[in-house]
Image: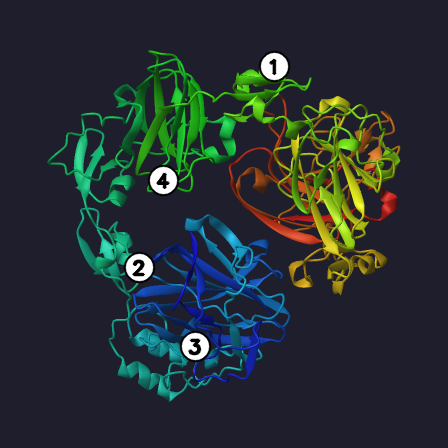
Amino acid sequence: MIKLLSTMTCITMGLASASMAQDVVITQNDSCDTDSLEAVACGAEGSTAENWYARNILVDQTVSVNSITWGSANPTSVTANIFFSISSGPGNPDANVLTPVGTATQLMDVGGLYTTAVDVPFTVPAGSYLVVEMQFPDTGTDAGCYPHTSASPGSTTYLKAADCGITAYDTVDSIGFPNSQVTMCLNASPGEFDPCNAPLPALCAADVDMDGSVAVSDVLAIIGAWGSCGDGTFRPTGDIAPMPNGDCCVTVADVLAVVGSWGADCNVYGGCCLGDGTCTEATSMDCAADGGTYFGDNSTCADGDCTAAACCIGDTCSDLTADACADLGGVTRPADACSTIDCSIAIPGDECADALVAIEGANPFDTTGMTAGADLPTCTADEAAFGWEVPTNDVWFAFTAGNTVDYNIDTCDAASFDTSVVVYDACSGNAIACSGDGTDLTGCQLYYSDLVLSADAGSTYYIRIGGWDATELGAGTLNIGEVPPPMPGACCLQDSNCLDNLDDVQCAAFGGVFAGDSTLCADDPCAATGGGDECADAYEAFDGANAFDTTLATPSSEVPDDTQCSGTYLDWADSKDIWMFYVATGDGTCTFSACDAASYDTSMVLYEGSCDNQVACNGDGTGEAGCQSYYSNIADFPVTAGTTYIIRMGGYNGGAEFGPGTVTITLTEAGATAACCAQGSCVDDTTIDECDALGGTWFNGATCADVTCYTGCPTGADVECDDCALDGSDSALDCNAGLNGATGTEFQDIALGTPVCGTSAVFVDGPTGSTYRDLDWFYNAALNAGGDFTISVGTSGEDLLFGILDNVPDANGDNFFVEAYTLTGGTEGTVTFATIPAGDYSLVVGAGSWNTDWTCDSGLVDYWVQLD
């Protein structure tokens, strides 16, 4: 859980050691004092998980950073890690490209303030954003950051803690702790960093050539640089005296320093675990030469695990460490020694033929000592979360069904690892069920498997449990249980009748709507499904989320005027519809959105005052995340307090689209100010009317620190090969139509690191007369090779669709995006996505929706895209 911790840790960011000038202070806070108030951290009472804290600070002049001052109330010996990076922009660190520039570490052995020198001082150029991140490891005791509640407006602290499900940076405000802002003050020297101001190495500064000893070669290095002095941009080789900072010149003092340290051993040693389980202290190079595992510089053998256990290499057994065993292609049996096992005897559960017997209930397992099966299973039903793209340690169970029913099978176990599961109908048989990650259970590890097996009584099924990748292995629990039969309840039918004692499956067979488990018709549960079928029967909606369901609704006689939303695919026809009314709670603008990932392709009509005064409509909206593929959105509609607005919800293509959904109403009161992107610049504190007058895009609730505005085509960019598609253009001549092209091979090359500028429009195709969206398809060989990638984009005025599409169709002949995103019009942004496997991909860019207002004449069609 996320909790508040008192007497925690604070950050006062701050720079310049005691020997440096400290005449520049840059901060987002109105004071550099620390508050001993409660702090926010992930963990349980009395213990804290791994937490990361970050702030993104604008540095308006060139400075050099030398140290950081911060404090801890944690008396436990814990090492805090601090990372400094230049950010590509303001806001959330995860939304920017970070270039590391410095690090620092501090062992906290008592509570109090620390001044920690950065490992190597660094320069921050004027106008840069500096991201400072502090990592506190899983300590087992309270540790975290003191907040400072007087942060300047627009500044914020970011936190991530995987153990609490926050796997990416989020603001402490959004997780419920707006007063827990971290104090960070940058105290630095003006101008670029002079390397001669940095302290010399505390140990072995006389080892000039860094070969591990002080000898003749170091004297020769000094003679080679004799008389040279630094000019503010470098320290001359051989400047090693006097301590602690040298004098920035190579003189007799440096020769004397070498003589004074003559013969010193300057090698760095650490714990080295050898394959047979013995440990010694050695240099990293000597340890590697001996085939050992190095525990790190200045470590000891107590800092790592050097335990030997049974290693089976075929039928042969040797007592080796896990690393040594893996290097030899063996399998470690961590709980055994060679004196207690026989490697020629199969491990129970290691292969299907030796499967463990599973029963209904909990079945413990451990894949640590298992081998990694060479055949790689697949899971089309859960492909994105399944993994298992390399051999992973796996275990087999055999389960014989006692009844012909559905069985729940899961690996929910809070102490276990990221599992993947496949069920087969026989050894070497067909895979009949699979799961990468489940979502509905509680009390589990972060990623667990969860599936339903339809079984026949007396049949045996073989359950194979592996990991997301080769690093995921260990102990866990296989849980098996019958799926409970559905509970009966009331079933609401379209003729206003109601039937009792039907379950959800039976009710659906009658064409009804199930009112819920244990409901009764006598309690009139169908009233909620019948309200709002006609305008006269509209029910009230309020600010926030409002549920509706058109399943049992009938088409109303009023025909919407789709000229008010031409090009948005209202396509009302004879749609089932539900009516609701909203009384505006203030003057301003309202957004009415049907974004709901579990809903259908909606169409929306808005009336003011009466059922015959239509004022707006929308078929397909854009700009929101987490929605169904096509949803309606009437945004920023002017409203007057006390006036009634009637919302009519239907579906695309007449009666083809219907079902449950949600209308979310968001009121922005008159006079509210926010950021406005206009003509490539961001203007803060503008009203929506002022932004419209500037021809800009208004970002409700945001400041310019949160928004990156579109600034046009970047310098040095390539140009996409086709012109803006006008009505009458021939789509068959599109040079980058990709899979939609005449041959399906019309791709344009895009180089890593080089932006491409282009246009995308919605147009009427000349030869066919159909409305097309001009999608641009780009190819890059490095993308097909797989790996980690970043896409940076900008768009002039309309929402932009972009992402990575798999060129290989599925069994139904359909192609799907591996990663897909929408960028708000008038902005720029960057997304980084996790490793994708090698394959056949395209980078696809185009209009965010089938909006026929997005034409070449609108001036809103320009974009740029860059792949890194």
Precedes in sequence: disc 2 or disc 4: 2
Q: Residues within 10 Å of mark 2 (few under 14, many from 20)?
A: some
Disc nearest the viewer among 3 and 4? 4
Residue 296's disc number: 2
Precedes in sequence: disc 1 or disc 4: 4
**Whether residue 719 is visible:** no
Precedes in sequence: disc 3 or disc 1: 3
Precedes in sequence: disc 3 or disc 4: 3
**Secondary-structure class at tag 1:** loop
**Secondary-structure class at tag 4:** loop
On the image, numbered disc 3 is attached to which residue? 237
Looking at this rendering, what residue extends furthest in the bottom direction? 252
Distance from label 3 to label 2 (Cα)? 27 Å
Residue type, numbered disc 3: Thr
On the image, numbered disc 1 is attached to which residue? 510
Give yes or no for contact between labels 3 and 4 (Cβ–Cβ under 8 Å): no
Give yes or no for contact between labels 3 and 2 (Cβ–Cβ under 8 Å): no
